[in-house]
Image (spheres, rainbow, N blue to C red):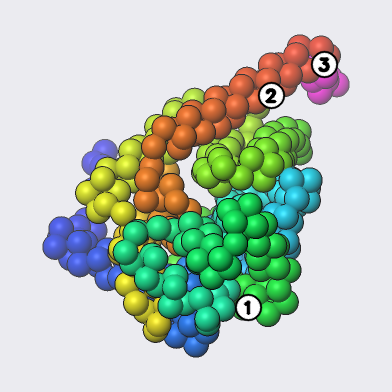
């Protein structure tokens, strides 16, 4: 008997490289263009939320299909202003995070948790540190401060308020506090946040569906109810407690990374795949190291005047490139590359308000270590409980009558 050999011609390496480069450029434009257009229209740095929406929409479509992509885009946009308001209090922030992860856990029954997981990950950023809606009168001051000192918005706003008020440091702190509260409750700002997230998410959903309509995307794999329940409890408890802690301790700047670590590393199943878990843990830390190395090479954020607004364009561009790579890697045979790329992507796309994006240090590393340890401990408890339950359940095998 002769074996049938595969006679399908292999694609030349140059063609593969050109093809993947074209895909990367197209994805880059899908992430950047909606954000850039909204930035020109509104002249507000918070228009960059559209880039986060683009990643949410793209992942939802690729992992769950058109219907899930549209629903996820709508849900993320409607939850975004709630996340900003919920960040005023530790308890409201924790409750909203639990509700979001509860939905992710519920969807794990249908294998859709990976399609929707970016919603709580990216909404943790505006909950903890919202990108502002800047009054026109402060743009001049902010531009000078940001350009000259390489500060983030939180530091710049503090200095601008202090310089304009001529008050004591205590009075300035009080003024800043009230200004941030007013920002989180401003109807115009919250309405535009919905627009930013929805437009950013729906554009890649529609375009990618049209481009990939003839391709067979991977189908979601359902999970048993017992395993989905364990997964849901784990992510709800860990992220809820984490969000409460980080809102209650505003000086801890890396809460969003901590929550992302928990959601990325936690997996469904009582039979934990240690190889995959190891890839996720090592990939997350490799991404952190890559971000630290990049920031050491690039230095602090360089604020460039974009339609009259000082923006850390250099960090946004690099963050978008990492996002494109993460999308490609997510659906490749080497998913460990995804875990390396998504960490710097999330940090750099939020560089406007997160000071640690310009000064990565020990706190990031500690939070990622603690997050990974908590996930592994939770997985161990889940495995132990599952095995005890199996041991105590009688073996009810089907008896075939003769």
- Residue 7 shows up from this direction: yes
Quadrant where the C terminus is found in the figure? top right
Q: Quadrant of residue 334?
A: top left
The residues colored magenta run: 395-402
Q: Secondary structure at mark 3?
A: loop
Mark 1, other Cα within 10 Å: few <14 / some 14–19 / many ≥20: many
Quick check: 381 above or below 86? above
C-beta proximity under 8 Å, tags 1 and 2: no
Q: Which residue is mark 1?
A: 192
Q: How far is mark 3 from mark 1, CA to CA?
A: 54 Å
Locate residue 159, reporting x and y percent: 49, 61
- Relative to the observer, which residue lies in front, 336 or 172? 172
Q: How far is mark 2 from mark 3, CA to CA?
A: 17 Å
- Residue 263 shows up from this direction: no
Q: Is residue 36 left or right of residue 50?
A: left
Which labelled disc corresponds to residue 286? none
């Amino acid at each position: 008997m002769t074996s049938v050999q595969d006679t399908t011609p292999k694609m030349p390496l140059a063609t593969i490289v050109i093809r993947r480069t074209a895909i990367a450029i197209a994805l880059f434009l899908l992430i950047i263009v909606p954000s850039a257009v909204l930035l020109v229209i509104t002249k507000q740095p918070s228009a960059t939320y559209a880039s986060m929406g683009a990643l949410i929409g793209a992942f939802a479509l690729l992992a769950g299909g058109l219907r899930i992509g549209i629903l996820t885009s709508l849900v993320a946009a409607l939850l975004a202003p709630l996340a900003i308001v919920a960040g005023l209090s530790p308890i409201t922030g924790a409750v909203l995070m639990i509700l979001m992860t509860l939905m992710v856990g519920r969807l794990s029954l249908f294998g859709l948790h990976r399609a929707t997981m970016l919603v709580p990950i990216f909404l943790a950023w505006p909950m903890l540190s919202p990108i502002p809606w800047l009054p026109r009168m402060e743009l001049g001051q902010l531009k000078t401060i940001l350009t000259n000192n390489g500060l983030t918005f939180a530091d710049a706003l503090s200095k601008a308020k202090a310089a304009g008020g001529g008050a004591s440091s205590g009075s300035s702190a009080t003024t800043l506090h009230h200004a941030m509260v007013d920002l989180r409750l401003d109807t115009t700002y919250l309405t535009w946040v919905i627009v930013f997230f929805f437009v950013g998410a729906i554009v890649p959903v529609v375009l990618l569906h049209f481009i990939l309509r003839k391709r067979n995307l991977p189908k979601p794999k359902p999970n048993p109810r017992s395993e989905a329940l364990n997964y849901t409890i784990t992510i709800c408890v860990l992220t809820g407690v984490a969000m409460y802690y980080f809102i209650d301790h505003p000086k801890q700047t890396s809460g969003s990374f901590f929550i992302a670590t928990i959601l990325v590393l936690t997996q469904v199943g009582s039979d934990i795949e240690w190889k995959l878990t190891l890839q996720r843990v090592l990939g997350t830390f490799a991404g952190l190291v890559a971000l630290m190395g990049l920031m050491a090479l690039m230095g602090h954020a360089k604020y460039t005047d974009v339609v009259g607004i000082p923006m850390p364009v250099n960090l946004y561009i690099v963050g978008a490139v990492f996002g494109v790579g993460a999308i490609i890697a997510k659906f490749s045979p080497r998913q460990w590359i995804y875990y390396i790329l998504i960490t710097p992507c999330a940090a750099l796309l939020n560089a406007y308000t997160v000071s640690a994006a310009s000064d990565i240090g020990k706190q990031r590393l500690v939070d990622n270590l603690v997050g990974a340890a908590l996930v592994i401990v939770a997985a161990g408890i889940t495995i132990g409980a599952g095995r005890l339950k199996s041991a105590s359940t009688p073996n009810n095998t089907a008896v075939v009558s003769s």
